[in-house]
Amino acid sequence: MTDNNSISSATPSATPDTPQRTSIFDNSLIWFGAGVSVAEIMTGTYFASLGFARGLAAIVLGHVIGCTMFFLAGYIGARTRKSAMETVKMSFGRIGGQLFAILNIIQLVGWTSIMVYDGSISASTAFPGAPWLWALVIGALVLLWIAIGVENLGKMNTVAMALLFILTIVLCKVIFFSGAAAGSTLDDTFTFGAAVELAVSMPLSWLPVVSDYTREAEKPLGATVASTVVYGLVSIWMFVIGMGAAMYTGTSDISQIMVSAGMGIAGLLIVVFSTVTTTYLDAWSAGISGESVVSKIPGKWMAIAATVLGTAAAMIWVMDDITNFLYLIGSVFAPMVAVMIADFYFLHRDTEHDAFDWPNLIVWFVGFVAYRLLMSIDTPVGYTLIDMVLTLVLALCVGQVRKAMAVRKPQPTASETAESEPKAADSAK
């Protein structure tokens, strides 16, 4: 007899109704596009005040921590063939998981607006045109990507990624071989621990999204590993470009760097295509998360709605500083994923058929509060790792207590079972 709350470790086999699977190369392209981002370059500028050696160490350490969580979250979706928010229901219940789906939709619409905003500001600096007009252009291109769909991007995505790869190499040459270092004017109170935490925050922001893409992988383990490694390396590369821009050119405005270097159209293409390929993932996942809440509306239409809302917000509001937004995302989703890791990898539980899993929701809330409290403490490894370890240990302890209580629960005797059967038959009549 199998436990209804246990998770099968077998990967579902393909059927005639199985959707088209993505290859390891496809997944690598998807996450290459996610990593090449103006937002990641801009975040990297904060590291300049640490100096190149300490800044690079903080970037690498933060990405090792964040990408480890990225892999663990993504592999759950790859093994179960479930979207990110459907895997959340396995730990928090059918309705409990919808709470996180709604929060995820909100943060993804927020990310969509931030990405379009950053791209429109940079594009208007690199090439003539009002920011609102460039926001419309970027939004329209994101809608085109959504209309094509992740399974059908194919050669179009390959060409876009090859173009971005070449252009980012050119950008590196412009930044690191443009002359002597100009020195950083950024805040020198930025500590190593704060830098590590900021580096963690970028891969962490993808935790409630990654399974939306690994679930479609033809080879779950290989695709998840490739996605993690490609995203991690490319994200580190973008951070280093941003740090180098602030250190070697004396400015943190990446668009100004491209203009002063005479990159012109090449700089514009970097800004626009990197924004589109990253924003597309946010909008598409907003639609997938929406299906977890309202299954009757196709995810593609909700992704379109997220893009329209995000583009409109980018045209209206100023979004120059996103650090508080990143930390808010971490405080919500880091303890959520810690609970999921405990359930899937250690406790082998699945409660998606229950309405709520209250013990796990309480553990998550404790982790959320702990994260906010830990934000005031400076440690060499930041506070996300500490919070996730604490939440993971608490979830494991609660899981063991629940197992012990289930074992001690008295089972009905044979005579009690026999007596209950006639009563059940009578009540059925």
Image (cartoon, helix red, strand yellow):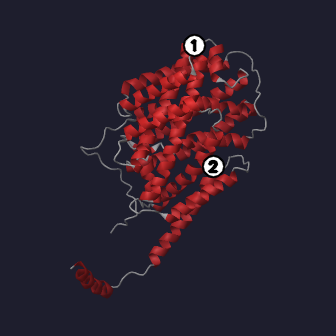
Q: Quadrant of the C terminus?
A: bottom left
- To which quarter of the image does residue 349 belong? bottom left
The residue at 49%/70% (across/down) is 402
Q: Which residue is mark 2?
A: 384
> In this rendering, does residue 72 appear at all?
no
The residue at 70%/34% (across/down) is 55
At label 2, the amino acid type is Thr
Q: Quadrant of the N terminus?
A: bottom left
Q: Position of residue 426 (x, y in %)?
A: 23, 83
The residue at 63%/54% (across/down) is 387
Query: Most extreme residue toward the front, as rendered?
Result: 316
Q: How many marks?
A: 2
Mark 1: secondary structure:
loop
At label 1, the amino acid type is Gly
Q: Going by the image, does 71 lie left or right of 152?
A: right
> 107 or 209: nearer the eye?
107
The residue at 71%/44% (across/down) is 193
> In this rendering, does residue 258 appear at all?
yes
Classify 228 as above or below 241.
below
> 229 or 377: nearer the eye?
377
Q: Position of residue 259 (x, y in %)?
A: 63, 15
* Label 2 to label 1: alpha-carbon separation: 39 Å
Q: Which residue is mark 1?
A: 264
> 253 or 159: nearer the eye?
253
Mark 2: secondary structure:
helix
Classify 36 as above or below 397.
above
Query: Most extreme residue toward the right, as rendered?
Result: 188
Query: Most extreme residue toward the left, as rendered?
Result: 429
Q: Position of residue 21 (x, y in %)?
A: 34, 38
Q: Position of residue 15 (x, y in %)?
A: 26, 46
Which numbered disc, 2 or 1, marks the residue that appears first in the sequence? 1
